[in-house]
Amino acid sequence: MGKKLDTCDYYCAGQFEKLFETEYNSFWDSRANESEFAAFYVEPVQATGGYIIPPPEYFKRIKKVLDERNVLMVDDEIQMGFFRTGKFWALEHFGVKPNIVVFGKAMTNGLNPLSGVWAEERLISPQKFPPGSTHSTFSANPLGTAAALATLQWIEQQHYEEKVMKSGAYFLERLQDLKKRHKTIGDVSGLGLALRIEVTESDRWTPNKALADKNI
């Protein structure tokens, strides 16, 4: 798995760049010299997708392509934000600054549904994004904003970057020990406390759904 992900740093980013080459196999309009889409969403560490951690340079290459084509990068931090990976935003691990960040969930520590968005000033200034120009089911409400404020104040006091990285390294080491002892464990990896373990056949590659679903 590790070799494939390292290769993906170059191969997958290269494949992404090729999407902009012609209008026949992509979403790039060569005659208008612009993309058919204004923004591209990324999830720094895939959550439901399997906690896949990209190679170190992957998002830098993606961002370079997007900037060249005037396409905004939107960072989805709904599940990985607020120090789950050891950084306030997971994308910080990859040295890339997005144009927009969307977030929620951990912002209120699960007490009240609340979502938020950050964007560059040129995108979200009062002139570009006046009050009433949009709405959200989980936008500001008295209970949610109070819970979010209390949560952020607590986070500031806890030194989570150091704690999460230390705890994550400990648990990852334990997972690696399990892998040595059990042939039904394939790849294990993690970033902070965003950890993954593959349950496989004895070849350490073929998914073993029956074992993964088994109640012990």
Image (spheres, helix red, strand yellow):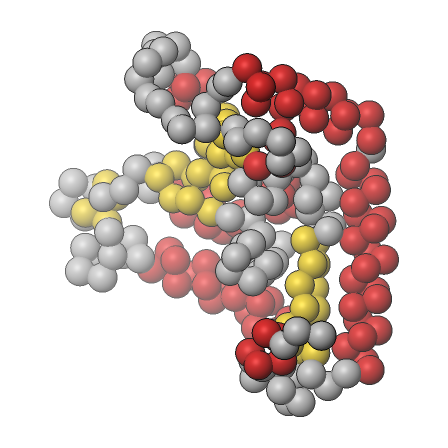
Which image quarter holds the N terminus?
bottom right
Height in image: 73 above or below 214? Answer: above
Q: Is residue 32 left or right of residue 146?
A: left
Q: Is residue 174 left or right of residue 54?
A: right
Residue at 77% x, 83% y: name it: 182
Residue 117 showing in the rendered view: no
Residue 165 showing in the rendered view: yes
Height in image: 63 above or below 181? Answer: above
Q: State the image quarter where residue 204 is shown.
A: bottom right
Q: State the image quarter where residue 110 is shown.
A: top right
The percent position of residue 113, horizontal first and vertical second, equals 53, 31
Number of numbered discs overlaid on the protein picture = 0
Q: State the image quarter where residue 208 is shown.
A: bottom right
Q: Is residue 178 left or right of residue 207?
A: right
Q: Residue furthest bottom?
A: 202
Q: Residue furthest left?
A: 31
Residue at 54% x, 40% y: name it: 78
Residue at 55% x, 15% y: name it: 142
The percent position of residue 125, horizontal first and vertical second, equals 41, 14
Front-most of residues 105 and 14 = 105
Q: Is residue 92 left or right of residue 119?
A: right
Height in image: 15 above or below 209? Answer: above
The percent position of residue 114, horizontal first and vertical second, equals 52, 28
